[in-house]
Image (cartoon, rainbow, N blue to C red):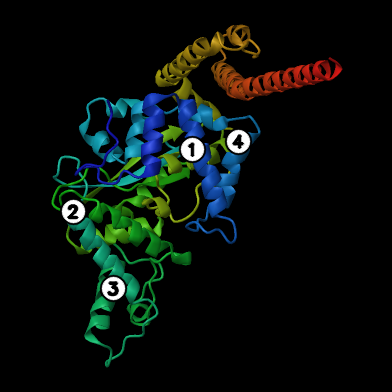
Amino acid sequence: MASYQPTAEIPVMGTRRKAMLQALDNGSLIDLLNVMYTFADQDYRASLPGAHAQKRTAKASMAMMRHDRDSGKRDMLKLLHAIPKPVIRAVIENTIGHRYVTEPGFKDHLSTADPRSSGIYLNTILVEGTGGRSLSANEWRDVRDLILRYQSGAGILISNVSPATEKANANVANQIETAYATATGYTKIGISAGQRHLINSHGKTNVFYERLGDRVKHAFDLDTRQLQCPCEVDLSHDLPDRMKDHHPASGLRITVKTWSLVLRALKVLEIPVQPVSIVILKVWDKGIMILLAGISVTMLASAPVEDGGFNPTQAGGSAVSDKTRFDNEMHDVFVEHEYLNDNFSTSEAELSKRNASLKSITRFDSKDIAGSISELGNNLAEITNARVELEVDLTTGLEKRKSEIDSLPSQIQDVTECINRTHKNVAFHNSISDWLGEDGS
């Protein structure tokens, strides 16, 4: 039986991560998606003006998820079925970097970053020479200390009479911004003037700093190298070219600031790192679907800074209308990998089992799509759409049946109350009859 408790190697196991893992292990991909839709509702409300929960910048992306559910399209269900379950689990756990470099056969589940291909990729950090492990709690603590010192000097003008601490922090900021290559906009005068080019707006860098503390305070052993590492998720219409931007050889000038800040801090700390970039999902529709794919993987990976990841902004991006590369991604997802069919078969078997278990209780009112699927022949895309529709339809039928079952106690109560009223009426009638009989005698 799977354990969802934190360990020395996987120290961060929050409520959301547990809920997603439990849905994945004990239910179907539909159950996992329903959990994610619940998170979308929560994050959408937290993005509204005046929200009392931790403020999030996710209104547009969460609205897109809610529309996917409420419209009945459930394109996100297709996307989840296109990711192998071992990959989904590794993404949720944030152990995908470790499994990618150490587990035999794990790479076989993944697509390659073909030139000019579109999809979603994930970045994570390992430490060189550790057998595919990430930082220890002590090393994360050192990274946090540098980030704190880097932020603390923002807006402070350094002069000859400045305190030694402020001068030392400015020196640290200079080391960070010149690690690997100078940060965009960097000048030494700017550092002395309090400029910090790797700080995100809206306090996101500080949120990242605070949540990074979870990897220290929840650690069982400060020296144990963790298998788990925060992730950064992004989408691209040219995967291999864009993925290179997140590696030190690129100079880290065109990447997420939090990611760049951590890699540069690790350089200052002289910790040799091995950034890993992994294609999670090729997307065969570059319109709205690639945006939903980015949102899905970002949520699975707990990639927003509010959840302990590297992403400071909400998921999604720009959809394109170009269809010239449509067939390549489609062939990769539908033909070259068997996991799509395996995932659908598993989901259908799970739904069939649920349907059978409830069939004796109430009538299943759902249209039969099986014949439609068989008529689709070899058109893989249409088969996928039909199977998703079947699962959605079955889910709707099951929800309807459960609703009918849930209403039975209320109906029984109504009948019981009716019987009680009848008994009272009869008793009252008998009392009146007895009274009248006694009065006439």
Q: Amino acid at mark 4?
A: Asp
The residue drawn where x is 33% and y is 28% is 86
Q: Distance from label 1 to label 4 (Cα)?
A: 12 Å
Furthest toward the front, the residue is 441
Q: Earlier in the sequence, mark 1 or mark 4?
A: 1
In the depicted structure, whether residue 13 falls above or below residue 384: below
The dot on residue 68 is 4
Q: Earlier in the sequence, mark 2 or mark 3?
A: 3
Residue at image mark 2: 272
Residue 289 spot, x, y in % from top left: 56, 35
Q: Amino acid at mark 3?
A: Asn
Given residues 70 and 122, the one toward you in this image is 70
Circle 1 crowding by C-alpha within 10 Å: few under 14, some 14–19, many from 20: many
Q: Amino acid at mark 2?
A: Pro
Q: Looking at the image, is mark 4 or mark 3 nearer the viewer?
A: 4
Label 4 residue SS: helix
Q: Amino acid at mark 1?
A: Met
- Locate residue 416: give its quadrant: top right
The dot on residue 225 is none
Label 3 residue SS: helix
The residue drawn where x is 32% and y is 39% is 93
Circle 4 crowding by C-alpha within 10 Å: few under 14, some 14–19, many from 20: some
The dot on residue 174 is 3
Circle 2 crowding by C-alpha within 10 Å: few under 14, some 14–19, many from 20: few
